[in-house]
Image: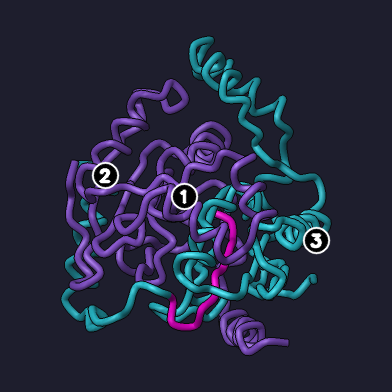
Chain colours: A cyan, B purple
Amino acid sequence: MTEIQKNVESASETYSSSFNQGHLALPPAKKYLVLTCMDARIDPARAFGISLGDAHVIRNAGASAQDALRSIIISEQLLGTQEIVLVKHTGCGMLTFKNEDAYGIVEKTLGSEASAELKSRGLDFLAFPKLEDAVKQDVEYLKNTKLVPDSVNISGWVYEVETGKTVRVV
Amino acid sequence: MTEIQKNVESASETYSSSFNQGHLALPPAKKYLVLTCMDARIDPARAFGISLGDAHVIRNAGASAQDALRSIIISEQLLGTQEIVLVKHTGCGMLTFKNEDAYGIVEKTLGSEASAELKSRGLDFLAFPKLEDAVKQDVEYLKNTKLVPDSVNISGWVYEVETGKTVRVV
């Protein structure tokens, strides 16, 4: 067992010993979803004020709307959420590279078999060069797809990892 | 401004007013990533013991490894994580439907244009019928892809939404 696995077990013991939220229902009580980045410096529950049971939280590299589409459709169509809060953040890793860089790193560190698998998948890493533009573009993407109905309210924000503030962009 | 947007702004004010973690680095300090479900009843930071800055947290519908692959590659190859903690959970919505159900609901509620868009994307919703089997299968998936090197330690767990416990499966 690794130190990280031991830490999960000890956190589980502590958390479950005072846990009293076993009654919460599957559909989010406040009918919204938050889409944000996987970045280690973001604690969505505290930074964005999400109480347990209130909202779906989708996280991926860069808070990509395109990458999250499967989860968003499930959230909206099967579990009744009606609002999307999309939050990218300052200092995001996605601002620092391009597809060709990632493809090059995989080839160099993982070798030719991995590189061939990556190419055969045609994976787009969905990096972006400008933060606020990316927020606007992802909100537009969600407004344009027919898979998110017009009745869904969508807002776009930037979380500042330096200050802990979340600022509305669109 | 919606109630949910007001809530983000007020949470931001509270959180940032006592925020003192602006120094944290981009790469996760403890070099691991947690992959779990978007379910509203999961608070990964508290349930799994993740301190701010320590780990990437990827969340999607069902904690799907396949859906998370883009983010996992970025986490491992560009940001130096070396261990994966994969956590699915009891009562998951992904246990309750199949692709054909989701396709039917989209057609019924969003209409034929949305249905055509969904079909043209060929989207797989990646639902699963059995929880522990799905944990094992996703761990296998990550062990089998060349895009995750053998040196990465991968464990699979189930979080119990009824008790707040996280139990190791594999």
Q: Are marks 1 and 3 in contact (CB under 8 Å)?
A: no
Q: Label 2 sits on what residue type?
A: Val
Camera-side mark, 1 or 3: 3
Q: Which residue was labeled with disc 1? A: B29
- Give the chain letter at badge 3: A
Left or right: B29, with A147 as reference point: left
Q: Label 1 sits on what residue type?
A: Ala
Q: Are marks 3 and 2 in contact (CB under 8 Å)?
A: no
- Give the chain letter at badge 1: B
In this picture, is A110 found above or below B7? above
Measure how far apart labels 3 and 2 are at the Cα level: 36 Å
| Category of crowding for the residue at label 3, using alpha-carbon neighbours closer than 10 angstroms: few (below 14), some (14–19), many (at least 20) | some
Q: Earlier in the sequence, mark 1 or mark 2?
A: 1
Q: In this rendering, do the residues under marks 1 and 3 share a single chain?
A: no
Q: Label 3 sits on what residue type?
A: Lys
Residue B169 point in image, percent of width and height:
17, 46
Measure how far apart labels 1 and 3 are at the Cα level: 30 Å
Tell me the element at label 1: loop
| Category of crowding for the residue at label 2, using alpha-carbon neighbours closer than 10 angstroms: few (below 14), some (14–19), many (at least 20) | many
Q: Which residue was labeled with disc 3? A: A136
Residue A157 point in image, percent of width and height:
71, 69
The N terminus of chain B, quarter of image: bottom right
- Give the chain letter at badge 2: B
In the picture, the disc for residue B135 is 2
Residue range highlighted in magenta: A28-38
In the picture, the disc for residue B3 is none
Q: Is residue B155 magenta?
A: no
